Image (cartoon, grey):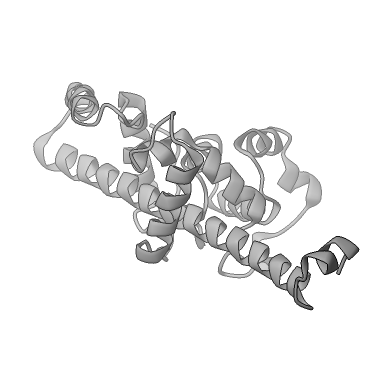
């Protein structure tokens, strides 16, 4: 304890307790960010699945998706995820990862555009799984993920997906920060661009209590269409 702390009459062990509390708060915020992200990814997968089903059953074309995009924008003007292109990404996600996994790895541990990058830049299931796992372990930003794919990092390292565990490790702090940078996440919470720090923290606390992180089974692969 410092001399200043002694002068304030702080109890022995206070500094260690404060450090522990800071760690607990940081970890709770990270879990909350991933819980909210999981809800958003699951929502996108469900919407994509609905589009896939209705196109198959009713012969929907791209004009219906364009109309759906306009109607959802009108209904939820504070959310940015309703462009025609993003709805098509949702459809693609549902088609190729119907159970919410990239290979054997839970997709909902990654921010949305990490998932879009993996699905659109890579056609091979094992490659997608390898890069998904690395993105979580290393806390890659979307830009870093794109660069590593472009530079064929997996081939240069010669690593095999079969050497990895079947489940992803605990969410990486850097990736939690990436999730918190995603504007779609706070649009989803109804906070938007002007959210104050207190509003954000309150939303995170609410969602860590009531939003479970989902688990799932395997994802097939195909090229973007």
Residue 71: x %, y % from top left: 17, 26
Q: In this view, does 51 lie to the left or right of 149?
A: left
Viewport quadrant of the C terminus: top left
Question: Of 59 and 77, which appears nearest the observer?
Answer: 77
- Whether residue 161 appears in this view of the structure is yes
Q: Is residue 122 left or right of residue 138?
A: left
Q: Is residue 210 left or right of residue 161?
A: left
Residue 9: x %, y % from top left: 77, 71
Quadrant assignment, res 118: top right
Q: Which residue is drawn at 74% across and 72% down?
A: 14
Residue 84: x %, y % from top left: 30, 25
Question: Of 78 and 34, which appears nearest the observer?
Answer: 78
Seen from this angle, which residue lies furthest right? Answer: 3
Q: Is residue 99 above or below residue 9?
A: above
Q: In this view, does 34 lie above or below 189?
A: below
Viewport quadrant of the N terminus: bottom right
- Whether residue 123 appears in this view of the structure is no
Q: Is residue 91 above or below residue 102?
A: above
Residue 191: x %, y % from top left: 38, 37
Q: Residue at x 83, y 65 (%)?
A: 7
Seen from this angle, which residue lies furthest left? Answer: 58
Q: Is residue 8 above or below residue 80?
A: below
């Amino acid at each position: 304890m410092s001399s200043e702390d002694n002068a304030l009459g702080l109890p022995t062990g206070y500094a260690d307790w404060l450090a522990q509390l800071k760690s607990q708060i940081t970890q709770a915020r990270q879990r909350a960010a991933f819980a909210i992200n999981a809800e958003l990814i699951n929502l996108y997968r469900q919407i994509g699945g609905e589009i896939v089903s209705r196109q198959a059953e009713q012969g929907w074309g791209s004009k219906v998706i364009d109309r759906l995009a306009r109607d959802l924008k009108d209904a939820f003007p504070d959310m940015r995820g309703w462009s025609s292109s993003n709805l098509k990404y949702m459809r693609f996600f549902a088609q190729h990862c119907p159970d919410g996994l990239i290979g054997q790895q839970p997709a909902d541990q990654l921010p949305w555009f990490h998932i879009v990058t993996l699905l659109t830049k890579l056609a091979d299931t094992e490659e997608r799984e390898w890069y998904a796992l690395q993105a979580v372990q290393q806390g890659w930003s979307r830009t870093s993920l794109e660069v590593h794919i472009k530079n064929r990092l997996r081939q240069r390292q010669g690593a095999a997906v079969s050497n990895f565990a079947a489940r992803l490790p605990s969410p990486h702090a850097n990736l939690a920060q990436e999730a918190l940078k995603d504007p779609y996440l706070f649009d989803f919470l109804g906070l938007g661009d002007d959210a104050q720090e207190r509003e954000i923290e309150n939303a995170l606390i609410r969602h860590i209590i009531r939003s479970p992180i989902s688990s799932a089974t395997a994802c097939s692969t195909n090229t973007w269409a």
